[in-house]
């Protein structure tokens, strides 16, 4: 699906932004916290936002990969895996206990500076279960059984995980770490570790790491949920107080990164690198006391910077004078105590130095020219509105993760714990005092110098031209001074629509009682449903509409130009305004407009505050009826697409993936090959015609307008703007054309060899059916996914130790044609791939023949049933998403859906599904399905020619 979005930002502000980097929660008044004599810290609270009758258990450790010695590289993460094997009180294995008791919401995450274990959604009413989970946390603290047998059992799985992570991104981050972290300890630790160490270390090495660092003074137990905090505090004190404190504990070191006064330079070369590019990175110290006023200011200013800084590059592109295909700039956390400013660019061919100059000059403009007050105030207002909206929410936003983050930040950084709304108000108080000059000073202090800079170029081969260190330093010196800018000021838009619209009329109207909605037929043929949803869209208006057609109706000769049209919608401007003028107009108006062209549908969506509804629909009118396609920007687009295609690596895994793609989706007139001939067929003169064919006739569209507005106001907006769109009520309604671009072969079984690093065997099995499934069968197919996932996990990972992870996916769609699918993917060693694939087929046929035990079925069935029961408890009240689905279904089909249909007594529910149903639907799918059996293996060691 191709989505085209207007160049304005969404209205929704994430909670994380509103909290200044902290996700604080209400109800901390229930908190029981303290530190045991042995040094272990605990936080226990009742969470009003947790599911009824559940609790969540966490063990947070101020321990990570940064504490490893060279011969322990990767063992912090290895230890995390060992924790799910045998422990003092669970000799058969922690994972076996958790899965055996239907607990699947558990994980562990090892980071550079900290490690976290989680067991979530634990039923509190099941006798003794929470006590057992507490005992698991206690064993993790000091009772992991690190035996030679278990260490060797886990080694193969860890190495498989290493292989899966050994991607281009990992090789890149490992390679450039030396200059990013200036040779510090952070440059030497990547969590997953060194393959040499993973293959050769002894179990006594991991025992030594465990003994040195898993100790009470570096451990924190967190429990939140539907519990009695006082009772659980007593349990924690009783259970964890016996953990011994080490007599001669080594202090946890603080890892620092030395400043580099002069820029560091590095050239990264990898044959799989997809784009010739470069980046400039600047490391800065950040406040470590999260939640302090200084840290909150830093976060808020960073968010405003991230919104404003990219606009320089956007304005150059809007004028068609950019030297880059892609450009970005951002400020983000790096490691504990440090942040990073990052500029990344993909230049056009032979324009590396021009793009570099634009990058460096943008940095200088930010430091020397000051911050535009309107830009600053606009972004500040968005942050402010988001936090005020949160403050106005009387329901509270307590969640287990919110509590976890609150207590984590207090434990690691000393962040004050306050009631949720109190913290939001404190952040608001800081935000309202910030001015544009504060951001300017903040920027100048951090990037207004040449210290802690690193410049990296990325190429696929040594023969490619790349910016040299000398060229970079020369340009850095030259463009660190202000000069005549490449930008020009744009005349602001005074009135968006400065011509007279010819409003339409409502020629027919009828009530839809079951939906509580009104349907209007407009004089231009468009059909609109209206429903007041003030409760769900307080102070907002939302409009959606769609028409049949999409990509399926495009003639083969038009496919290249159609692709260009999709890519260039709203890229040249609207009416007489260019993109920079529109961006200036939009930045003061919180509205959102999207167009989408899918395989079978053309769609639109528009949303804003009610008081900005006229601006929203004025803008939508221009988007639909006054689209501009600039020839210069079209030429840039074609050049950019040619360059991206030409820059793709010609060997290695990328070449194999392209071969697989062409095998599964062969080249046809409706699926042309993306080569020079394809781009030659892109015609500028076709763009306006193709756009009009999809969005130029309002009579093809039906939709709905909902929100916090009266029927009279909705009528005014609809007739004034949507009714003014051109449309022919007598024109024949478009329909989609069902096309299947997939290969028609019944079976495709292929093995590919790739000159890629490591010992890799990647298996992808897919089964594609075209049968209509009943409601019962569709539900059974959804249960097949977790059931098969568990079976393969137990067999291929735990028993065979042949893979780190397994992905299973099922899907069923009834429209525009029935289709069901099952896909299985895993990565193993090249020599194990065939055997594990054969075992996968055996397991599939076992399941299809009915070999499903009641225990394994209940493990996946019960959570689905509980979710269904929770939904049924919510009563008849429908949310925004449900109403939109119902209204859209009526708009598209003309059939009146019943909002209470899901309550019907004869409806099949997930609780009705049996193990036999799952076996039956799998058997039905496998019978006659198209089979895709693809294996990719790395070359044998003696045949490798890998260079990087």
Image: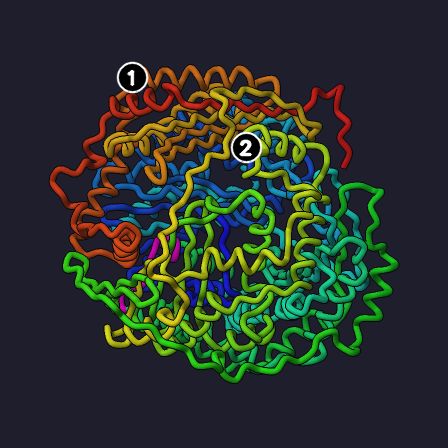
Q: Residue at x 81, y 55 (%)?
A: 350
Camera-nearest label, 2 or 1: 2
Q: Residue furthest left?
A: 905
User: x%, y% of residue 547?
Assistant: 38, 54
Residue on which disc 1 sits: 850
Q: CA distance from mark 2 to mark 1?
A: 34 Å
First to last magenta residue range: 394-403
x, y percent for residue 168: 66, 40
SS class, disc 1:
loop
Predominant secondary structure in magenta? loop
Q: Which residue is mark 2?
A: 665
Q: Is residue 744 magenta?
A: no
For the C terminus, the quadrant is top right
Percent x, y for residue 140? 44, 38
Per the image, is 395 magenta? yes
Q: Earlier in the sequence, mark 2 or mark 1?
A: 2
Give the side of residue 686 with respect to residue 892, left or right.
right
Which residue is more in the foreground, 686 or 711?
686
At a point 42% along the width and 15% down the height, the residue shown is 842
Residue reaching furthest to the bottom? 494
């Amino acid at each position: 699906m191709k989505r085209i979005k207007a160049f304005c930002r969404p209205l929704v502000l994430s909670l994380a932004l509103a909290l200044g980097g902290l996700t604080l929660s209400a109800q901390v008044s229930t908190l029981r916290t303290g530190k045991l004599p042995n040094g272990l810290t605990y936080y226990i609270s009742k969470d009003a936002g947790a599911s009824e009758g559940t609790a969540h258990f966490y063990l947070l450790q101020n321990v990570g990969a940064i504490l490893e010695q060279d011969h322990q590289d990767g063992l912090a993460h290895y230890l995390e895996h060992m924790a799910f094997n045998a422990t003092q009180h669970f000799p058969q294995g922690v994972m076996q206990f958790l899965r055996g008791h239907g607990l699947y919401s558990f994980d562990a995450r090892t980071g550079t500076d900290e490690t976290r274990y989680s067991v979530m959604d634990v039923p509190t009413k099941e006798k003794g279960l929470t006590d057992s989970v507490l005992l698991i946390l206690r064993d993790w603290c000091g009772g992991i059984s690190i035996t030679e047998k278990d260490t060797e059992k886990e080694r193969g799985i860890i190495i498989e995980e290493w292989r899966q992570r050994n991607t281009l991104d990992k090789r890149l981050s490992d390679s450039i770490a030396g200059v990013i972290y200036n040779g510090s300890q952070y440059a030497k630790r990547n969590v997953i570790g060194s393959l040499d160490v993973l293959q050769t270390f002894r179990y006594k090495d991991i025992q030594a790491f465990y003994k040195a660092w898993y100790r009470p003074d570096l451990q924190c137990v967190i429990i939140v949920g539907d519990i009695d905090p006082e009772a659980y505090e007593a349990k924690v004190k009783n259970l964890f107080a016996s953990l011994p404190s080490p007599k001669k504990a080594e202090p946890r070191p603080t890892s620092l990164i030395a400043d580099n006064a002069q820029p560091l330079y590095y050239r990264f070369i990898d044959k799989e690198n997809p784009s010739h590019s470069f980046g400039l990175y600047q490391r800065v110290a950040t406040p470590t006391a999260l939640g302090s006023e200084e840290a909150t200011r830093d976060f808020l200013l960073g968010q405003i910077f991230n919104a404003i800084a990219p606009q320089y590059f956007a304005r150059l592109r809007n004028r068609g004078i950019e030297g880059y295909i892609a450009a970005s700039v951002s400020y983000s956390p790096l490691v504990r105590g440090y942040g990073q400013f990052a500029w990344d660019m993909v230049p056009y061919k032979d324009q590396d130095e021009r793009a570099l100059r634009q990058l460096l000059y943008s940095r200088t403009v930010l430091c020397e020219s000051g911050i535009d007050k309107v830009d600053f105030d606009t972004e500040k207002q968005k942050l402010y509105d988001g936090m005020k909206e949160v403050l106005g929410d009387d329901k509270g936003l307590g969640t287990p993760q919110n509590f976890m983050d609150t207590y984590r930040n207090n434990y690691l950084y000393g962040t004050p714990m306050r009631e949720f709304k109190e913290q939001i108000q404190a952040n608001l108080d800081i935000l309202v005092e910030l001015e544009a000059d504060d951001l300017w000073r903040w920027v100048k202090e951090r990037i207004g110098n040449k210290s802690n800079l690193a410049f990296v170029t990325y190429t696929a081969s040594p023969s490619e031209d790349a910016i040299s260190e000398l060229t970079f330093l020369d340009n850095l010196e030259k463009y660190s001074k202000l000069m005549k800018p490449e930008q020009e000021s744009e005349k602001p838009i005074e009135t968006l629509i400065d011509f007279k619209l010819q409003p339409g009329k409502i020629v027919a109207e009828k009530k839809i009682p079951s939906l509580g909605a009104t349907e209007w037929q407009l004089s231009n043929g468009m059909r609109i449903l209206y429903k007041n949803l003030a409760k769900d869209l307080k102070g907002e208006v939302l409009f959606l509409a769609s028409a049949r057609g999409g990509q399926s109706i495009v003639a083969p000769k038009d496919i290249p130009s159609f692709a260009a049209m999709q890519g260039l919608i709203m890229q040249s401007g609207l009416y007489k305004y260019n993109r920079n003028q529109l961006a200036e107009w939009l930045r003061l108006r919180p509205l959102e407009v999207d167009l989408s062209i899918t395989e079978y549908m053309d769609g639109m969506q528009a949303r804003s505050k009610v008081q900005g509804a006229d601006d929203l629909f004025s803008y939508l009118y221009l988007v639909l009826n006054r689209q501009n396609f600039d020839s210069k920007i079209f030429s840039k687009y074609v050049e950019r697409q040619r360059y991206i295609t030409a820059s793709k690596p010609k060997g290695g895994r990328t070449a194999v993936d392209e071969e697989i793609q062409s095998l599964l989706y062969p080249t046809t007139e409706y699926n042309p090959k993306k080569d020079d001939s394809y781009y030659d067929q892109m015609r500028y003169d076709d763009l306006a015609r193709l756009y009009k064919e999809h969005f130029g006739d309002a009579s093809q569209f039906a939709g709905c307008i909902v929100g916090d507005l009266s029927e009279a106001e909705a009528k005014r907006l609809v007739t004034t703007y949507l009714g003014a769109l051109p449309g022919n009520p007598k024109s024949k309604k478009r329909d989609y054309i069902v096309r299947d671009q997939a290969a028609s072969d019944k079976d495709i079984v292929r093995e590919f060899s790739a000159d890629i690093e490591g010992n890799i065997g990647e298996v992808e099995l897919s089964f594609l059916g075209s049968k209509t499934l009943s409601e019962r069968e569709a539900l059974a197919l959804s249960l097949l996914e977790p059931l098969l996932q568990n079976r393969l996990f137990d067999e291929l990972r735990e028993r065979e130790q042949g893979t780190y992870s397994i992905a299973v996916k099922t899907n069923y769609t009834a429209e525009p044609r029935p289709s069901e699918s099952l896909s299985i993917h895993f990565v193993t060693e090249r020599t194990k791939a065939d055997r594990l694939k054969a075992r996968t087929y055996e397991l599939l046929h076992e399941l299809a023949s009915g070999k499903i035990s009641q225990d394994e079925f209940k493990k996946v069935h019960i959570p689905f049933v509980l979710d269904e029961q929770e939904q049924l408890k919510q009563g008849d009240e429908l949310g925004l998403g449900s109403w939109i689905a119902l209204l859209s279904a009526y708009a598209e089909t003309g059939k009146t859906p019943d909002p209470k249909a899901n309550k019907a007594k004869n409806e099949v529910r997930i609780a009705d599904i049996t193990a036999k149903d799952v076996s039956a639907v799998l058997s039905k799918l496998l019978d006659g399905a198209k089979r895709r059996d693809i294996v990719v293996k790395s070359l044998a060691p003696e045949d490798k020619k890998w260079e990087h």
